């Protein structure tokens, strides 16, 4: 009655404690569709090698169709005593096709090469879903950037007012890392595009099966070069886990920004009601929970990566059961990102900026001090001195509780004395405007409106290519 795939040399079935530890169907059942696709391709390889007659192959394919239907409608599911998804599906196949025919499918393959192929297939499919989700978030950021036009805000380093920037420039700063994450998924996909099917348990198979044909059927363009590597390496799973963790971090950085902008003190952004939550006790509360969950879940995504790397470290190089632990880490990452991304996209797409307030704040905190220094440099003052002179303006204004533009002509003449003549000194006012400051930053990648417009164009170009 017991249905382990390895009963022959054992005199007893597994103890309950072993079975409980060993069992993986509670998480690997989601590989069932890929497993059946693999079985189909493998059956045809057996047929081509003369190990199944045409009639047997036809019956096998029909049985696999039936099995797939039963999996789809839930009438076939793993049993308590099925060790893993492969064990359950073989039981199902035997039930449908009879043990004589059903028992033939396992020839020339092992759960080791199977599972290595299945995790690749499953991850490649979900990587596409995730990439699409990221591109939608990018789209929302680009649309917000376009809506912001030439609106300005305080640019910060160390969270202190540094230099004014366009709101669009700040938003676009989140687009590029996200596009790189999509690029990373694409690069990764090219690397993982090799099928381990046919590697057997570790050493390959003796039955003359054509692994290249199986690979094509399963959507791979090639076969792994080394059957030990094919079954044992999980670097490609770990690389996916890194990209997922990096995505989490990039989304968390954006979220942290939104959380701060959404505070009463900043009041730069208002979140849409449909993407905010309330408090069970404080009736006035409107909380940025999506952004906070994104920030929190990035910790979880990083943990999945760290756990997987720890599992892989120090494994002997061929299959060991430790490798079963690769799946929950990446399943959790995929589940997390697939619910997180649409929520973040909705939040970003619907948030409304308070441009007026951002503009008001943009030049404060002496954010135009660099513009004074660079104005002096254009007059031939060495930057070292220019920096000092501009600093002296800041000191003076700060002592008086003023901003730079409140300084008088006399003040500028006195501070710049010895470097700039008295008629020129007050002209420094020309650079003491936010628009002047951002417009002057015209170098490639700078915050000048025309550069930001180009930047948005090239991001849209990148979106089109995907
Ligand atoms: N369920 C295992 C995994 O997920 C595959 C089974 C391999 N078992 C074995 N005894 N070789 O990695």
Image (tube, helix red, strand yellow):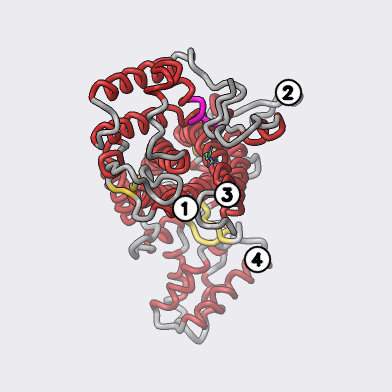
- The image shows residue 425, relative to residue 331, as above or below, that is below
Tell me, yes or no, whether the two marked residues, 4 and 1, touch with CB atoms within 8 Å.
Answer: no
Of the image marks 3 and 2, the number of the one nearer the N terminus: 2
Tell me, yes or no, whether the two marked residues, 2 and 1, touch with CB atoms within 8 Å.
Answer: no
Q: Residue furthest right?
A: 281
Instruction: Give the alpha-carbon distance from disc 2 to disc 1, as whole Å.
Output: 49 Å
Tell me, yes or no, whether the two marked residues, 2 and 4, touch with CB atoms within 8 Å.
Answer: no
Instruction: Give the alpha-carbon distance from disc 4 to disc 3, as whole Å.
Output: 53 Å
Residue 290 in picture, x, y percent from top left: 58, 34
- The N terminus is located in which quarter? top right
Instruction: Check disc 3 and report its element: helix, strand or loop.
Output: helix
Residue at 57% x, 37% y is 9
Assess whether residue 462 is covered by the magenta stretch.
no
Q: Tag 4: Cα neighbours inside 10 Å, few (<14), some, or many (≥20)?
A: some
Kindly identify which residue carries mark 1.
233
Q: Is mark 2 within 8 Å of ligand 1?
A: no
Q: Which residues are magenta?
A: 84-88
Kindly identify which residue carries mark 4.
398
Tell me, yes or no, whether the two marked residues, 3 and 2, touch with CB atoms within 8 Å.
Answer: no
Between circles 3 and 2, the one closer to the viewer is 3
Instruction: Check disc 1 and report its element: helix, strand or loop.
Output: loop
Q: Which mark is residue 308?
A: 3
Q: Tag 1: Cα neighbours inside 10 Å, few (<14), some, or many (≥20)?
A: some
Q: Main secondary structure of the magenta part?
A: helix
């Amino acid at each position: 009655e017991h249905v382990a795939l390895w009963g022959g040399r054992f005199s007893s079935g597994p103890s309950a404690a072993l079975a409980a530890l060993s069992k993986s169907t509670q998480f690997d059942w989601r590989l069932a569709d890929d497993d059946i696709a693999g079985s189909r391709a493998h059956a045809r390889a057996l047929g081509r090698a003369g190990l199944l007659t045409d009639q047997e192959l036809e019956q096998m394919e029909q049985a696999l169709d039936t099995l797939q239907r039963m999996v789809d409608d839930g009438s076939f599911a793993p049993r308590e005593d099925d060790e893993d998804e492969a064990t359950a599906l073989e039981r199902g196949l035997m039930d449908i096709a009879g043990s004589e025919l059903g028992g033939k499918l396992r020839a020339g393959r092992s759960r080791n090469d199977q599972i290595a192929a299945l995790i690749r297939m499953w991850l490649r499919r979900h990587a596409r879903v995730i990439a699409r989700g990221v591109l939608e978030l990018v789209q929302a950021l680009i649309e917000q950037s376009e809506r912001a036009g030439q609106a300005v805000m305080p640019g910060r380093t160390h969270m202190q007012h540094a230099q004014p920037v366009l709101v669009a420039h700040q938003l676009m700063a989140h687009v590029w890392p996200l596009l790189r994450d999509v690029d990373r998924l694409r690069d990764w996909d090219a690397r993982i595009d090799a099928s381990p099917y046919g590697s057997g348990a570790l050493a390959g198979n003796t039955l003359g099966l054509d692994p290249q044909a199986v690979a094509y059927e399963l959507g791979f363009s090639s076969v792994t070069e080394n059957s030990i590597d094919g079954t044992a390496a999980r670097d490609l799973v770990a690389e996916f886990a890194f990209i997922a963790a990096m995505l989490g971090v990039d989304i968390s950085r954006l979220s942290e920004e939104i959380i701060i902008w959404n505070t009463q003190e900043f009041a730069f952004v208002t979140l849409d009601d449909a993407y905010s939550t309330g408090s069970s006790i404080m009736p006035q509360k409107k909380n940025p929970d999506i952004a906070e969950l994104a920030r929190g879940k990035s910790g979880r995504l990083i943990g999945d990566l760290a756990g997987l790397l720890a599992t892989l470290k120090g494994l002997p190089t061929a299959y060991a059961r430790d490798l079963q632990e690769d799946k929950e880490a990446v399943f959790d990452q995929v589940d997390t990102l697939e619910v997180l991304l649409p929520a973040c996209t909705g939040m970003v797409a619907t948030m409304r900026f308070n441009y007026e307030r951002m503009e008001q704040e943009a030049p404060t905190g002496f954010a135009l001090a660099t513009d004074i220094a660079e104005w002096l440099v254009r007059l031939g003052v060495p930057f070292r001195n220019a920096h000092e002179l501009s600093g002296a303006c800041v000191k003076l204004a700060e002592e008086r509780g003023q901003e730079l533009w409140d300084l008088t002509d006399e003040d500028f003449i006195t501070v710049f004395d010895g470097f700039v003549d008295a008629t020129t000194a007050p002209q420094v006012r020309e650079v003491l405007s936010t628009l002047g400051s951002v417009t002057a930053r015209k170098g490639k990648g700078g915050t000048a409106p025309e550069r930001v417009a180009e930047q948005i164009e090239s991001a849209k170009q990148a979106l089109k290519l995907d």
